[in-house]
Amino acid sequence: ATGNSPTMIAANGVNTDGMRITGLAISNALVALSGFLVVQYQRFADINMGIGIVIVGLGSVIIGEALGKALGWTKIQWRLLAIVLGTIVFREILAITLALGIDPNWLKLITALFVLAVVAMPALKQRG
């Protein structure tokens, strides 16, 4: 609830530190709930189940943001759609990589390099 202007929220009498802690508690509870549901659905748990999920999530958001900027989408609805499209593009890249017969152990490196390329593309365009 603090957003970009914590001083404005504090001026309205809201405890900004309490709001941050509440937001973190809610997000952590949702993460725990999703992990619980995955374990119940798959009927087993493994210590390595979440490895690489951060790369997939960040990669999807970064690709979606780059796609939204490239298409000139500024409204939040279109930006969210761009992130969903970024997720689809990211998963297609993974599927194409596997279809080419590349060893699945290399997937994390390939996805990290692809995300790095997408992030570097605007800077390389400005250089000319």
Image (cartoon, rainbow, N blue to C red):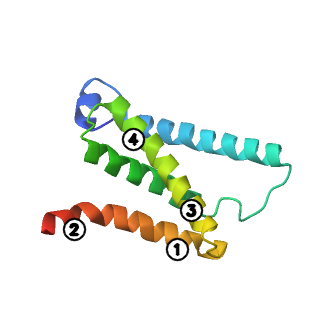
Q: Residue at x 42, y 63 (%)?
A: 115
Looking at the image, residue 98 lies above or below residue 8 = below
Instruction: Measure how far apart labels 4 and 3 are at the Cα level.
Output: 21 Å
Q: Name the residue under label 2.
A: 124
Q: Residue at x 62, y 65 (%)?
A: 99
Along the line of sight, which residue is nearer the eye, 62 or 11?
62
Pointer 2 and pointer 3: residues touching (CB < 8 Å)?
no
Q: Residue 96 carries which label?
A: 3
The mark that comes first in sequence, 2 or 4, is 4
Residue at the front extreme? Answer: 100
The mark that comes first in sequence, 3 or 1, is 3
Crowding near pointer 4: few (<14 within 10 Å), some, many (20+)?
Answer: many
Q: Residue at x 58, y 57 (%)?
A: 53
Along the line of sight, which residue is nearer the eye, 49 or 61?
61
Question: Mark 3 falls on what kind of element?
Answer: helix
Mark 4 vs mark 3: in front: 3
Crowding near pointer 1: few (<14 within 10 Å), some, many (20+)?
Answer: few
Q: Name the residue under label 1.
A: 109
Q: Find residue 89 and report its horizontal and vertical position in percent.
A: 48, 51
